[in-house]
Amino acid sequence: MESSSENGSRPDVHLVGLRKTYGEVVAVDRVDLDIRRGEFFTMLGPSGSGKTTMLRMIAGFELPDEGRVELAGTDVTDLAAYDRDVNTVFQDYALFPHMTVGDNVEYGLRVAKVGKDDRRKRRAEALEMVRLPGYDDRKPNELSGGQRQRVALARAIVNQPRVLLLDEPLGALDLKLREQLQIELKQIQREVGITFVYVTHDQEEALTMSDRIAVFNEGRIEQVGEPESVYERPANSFVAGFVGVSNVIHRDGGTFTVRPEKVRLLAPGDPTEGLVVEEGRIADVSYAGMVTRFHIELEGGDRLQVARQNLEQTSHEDEGMRGERVKVAWRREHTVAVAEQQGVGQSTEEET
Amino acid sequence: MEATGLGAPKPRRSAGHRLADLFHGRPRLQAGTLLAGPVGWLVIGYLGSLAILLIASFWSLGELSGEVERSFTLDNFKTIVEDSVYRTVTLRTVGIAAAVTVTDALLALPLAFYMAKVARPSRQSLLVVAVLVPLWSSYLVKAFAWRTILSEEGILNWALDPLGLSGPGYGTLAVWLVMSYIWLPYMIIPIYAGFDRIPDSVLSASDDLGAKAWMTFRRVIWPLVFPAIVAGSIFTFSLTLGDFIAPTLVSSTQFIGTVVKSTITTNLPLAAAYSVVPILIMIIYLLIARRLGAFEHV
């Protein structure tokens, strides 16, 4: 695990030995984690990996069986949710259905007894920030899913919390809207400078948005690091499989992984120095527009996925290659040794 | 194609098939056929009897003959409005209906909240059954049970005696107690459904935004569950308003129901006119309830 307080400042969220069980099930198993001030931190993992339980313990909705939660250097383990300087954006938005958008956004300020003029000003700013100016008098049921999630975001941000917790906030939205909101969320986070702790099972979302990612599996953290280090240098076969495509091969008693976009199909006469070359048979070809994916059964055992960008080829002309024998190659430094781990080959497209 | 030829006779279609063809693509006919029975019952059986009641309330009793005279008069309504006995009974009945409604709402709120938001799922269904089971036993049995409990030598006095206390005995207080008990499930179930409709995350959100329990109740739970309380109150209020059995069994006090029952054999037109009073009260009550949003989610 990476050292977390390298820049000397105290971490914003400091979790020590957190453990949470539900009956026989261990949801979170003695996790230590530091989240830095102002960073966009993502907890990534399949459903049931403990990431949401972690978030709920930071928020104060769940009490840990063991361990401590510290926010900005203060132990808040025993504080109720309403006494913690964090706010949450829920997956199902959790807007108050009987209140207007404006009253929803003002709720935290009203509870905190902020004066009316100040309330109006901050509510207008928050709605401006989520690009819903003038929506004050609408009711939540008059809004689309994306708009509701923007209101939920405004309702949390308007309180200027120390840390903002987001529990799969884009999970219920369709792909196009999700991609757009990913970019907007990241912009808003840069603008307000609040520490974001983001929970998702979508590895692409995690790679796109995060400053750092923690990969969860069965109540533990497998790896913490920046997106490129988690993707390019996965610590073990679980991370290799969950973040990206599970391209795990076993050679000489070791376990290795190589990313599909790093592998090329060799044409006869291509130079091979500095490359790892393997022979195999094309088991399947799937055309995906931007790329074509080749599933290769290697002679030395294991399957490898190769993604080829469609620079020249435009259509299904590769379909006929199914069953052909090919040579594949990649640069030696792109082979990453990984620790063998249970849970290999777990689907990356798993939905909650 | 097989060579059955053009001249082959069309296969005979069954009667059911032809009936289905008749309805195919005729949504009005479909709906009309489906609704004919229920609507007929509603118009003839239900509204019809109400209409006869209304008509009878304008008849009168012949002074000498004692026979019902079928001529139009407003005398019955005049009596009800002007005679202080009827006014007192009306106010008393409305009062007891309101008292029962408030009592049941106060009892049902915490219980329904526990059922919907606190109890584990297994206990939740157990509690729903426990609330519904009393409805399976006869109303009369329950009222009689209370008559026994509240009697001079009943179990209540027996239990309270060592403490130097005694039960309320028969009377208006007993009517309030029995009615509150009997109609309680009709209040619990709508409120339980109302709580069940509030997502847990909405309550968490209020908590998360800094609101303590009381604030969450006042600003989030109460406004969301209020229409359900109004919906439940329609049952408790109207059922108490028209009842005559419990008042007869545990009191000798007069309510609208008991007065109608005792008048109906001696002066049918007057009884009919007095029956119109609770109907009018309920119409007003329902109009208010609609304004309060009771029908928006039911």
Image (cartoon, rainbow, N blue to C red):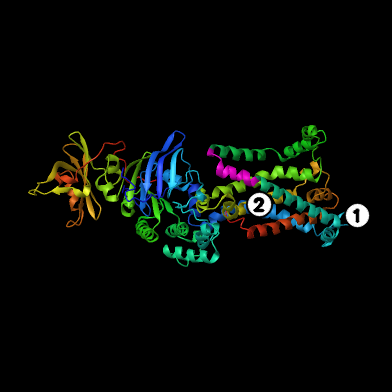
For disc 1, the chain is B
Residue at screen point 54% across, 39% down = B120
Task: Find the magenta span and give its range.
Answer: B108-121
The stretch drawn in magenta includes residue B92? no
- Residue positioned most to the left: A269
Q: Where does the image place residue A205, in percent across and percent down from the top left? A: 33, 52
Q: Where does the image place residue A22, in percent across and percent down from the top left? A: 46, 37
Q: Give left or right: position of A40 versus A61.
A: left
Image quarter where the N terminus of chain A lies is top left
The stretch drawn in magenta includes residue B120? yes
For disc 2, the chain is B
Residue at screen point 45% across, 63% down = A126
Please, what is the dominant secondary structure of the magenta stretch? helix
Q: Where does the image place residue A33, in percent across and percent down from the top left? A: 37, 44
Q: Which residue is mark 1?
A: B65
Tell me which amino acid carries mark 1.
Ser
Q: Which residue is mark 2?
A: B41
Label 1: which secondary element: loop
- Residue positioned most to the right: B64
Q: Is residue B298 visible?
A: no
To which quarter of the image does residue B269 belong? Answer: bottom right
Q: Nearer the viewer, residue B128 or B65?
A: B128
